[in-house]
Amino acid sequence: NDRITWMPLIEGQEPPVKRGISFNNEKILLNHFGRIHISGFVNAAFLRMVPRNDWFENPTPRPLNHGTSWWPWDGYVNWYDERTPPKRQYSMHTDRPRDLWPDLNLVHVDATSGFGNDRLFLRFETYTPNFSHFEVNADETGWKKTGDRWTWLLESGRNTLRIRAVNKLGAKGKPSVIALNHADAPFGNN
């Protein structure tokens, strides 16, 4: 059943939910059941998100509702922190803010150094709607199409790398920039 049922509001009556009122120097919120809730961040202690945004391409799977009661759909990404412990009925939890509030069209880079110090192994991550591919520009040699992993061979001196995401329509995101000074490791010196 895809119908939405709205709570009726009789003309001339106050809305069932108030913004916030002062009571004993505490800000509280009254809902339509007459219960008292603390307003503000404390009221949103449990936060979850459906982990996709392709509703027009793929109408399913989708949750049945987004109410405040528990139900057994396990597709949500759920927030946890020291004030909000993970809920056992859900399997996917995160404490990374960018999982719930992504930086659109930007590239995040994870770097690992290899044996020796002349290269970095990079992994790219982006939240770009209709993502197609990444492009890299090492030391202003021009943009090259690449996958989500790339090995950066370092030259002695200043090294600059620009990485951007490109979507299926060819729109390019703002480049992420890494600049570092590299010195060759001295081998064989006594």
Image: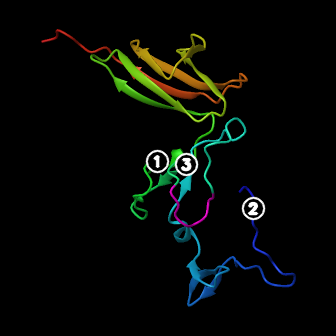
Whether the magenta-drawn stretch holds residue 70 is answered as yes
Q: Residue at x 59, y 75 (%)?
A: 39
Of 83 and 12, which appears nearest the observer?
A: 12
Q: Residue 71: within the magenta?
A: yes
- Contact between marks 2 and 1 (CB within 8 A): the answer is no
Q: Between tags 2 and 1, which lies in front?
A: 2
* Front in this rendered view, residue 3 or 135: 3
Residue identified by numbered label 3 = 100
Q: Looking at the picture, which amino acid does disc 1 mark?
A: Arg
**In the rendering, which numbered label is found on residue 96?**
1
Q: Amino acid at mark 2?
A: Ile
Q: Is residue 190 above or below residue 27?
A: above
Image colouring: rainbow
Frontmost residue, 164 versus 181? 164
Q: Quadrant of the C terminus?
A: top left
**Number of the front mark, 3 or 2:** 2
Q: Spot the residue most to the bottom.
A: 24
Three-letter amino acid code at disc 3? Leu
Q: Quadrant of residue 8?
A: bottom right
Find the distance from the CA under tag 2 to the CA under tag 1: 33 Å
Q: Could you say where residue 165 lies in the image, as x and y percent from the top left?
A: 61, 26
Residue shown at the point (69%, 76%) measured from the top left: 19
What mark, if any, has residue 4 been given in the picture? 2
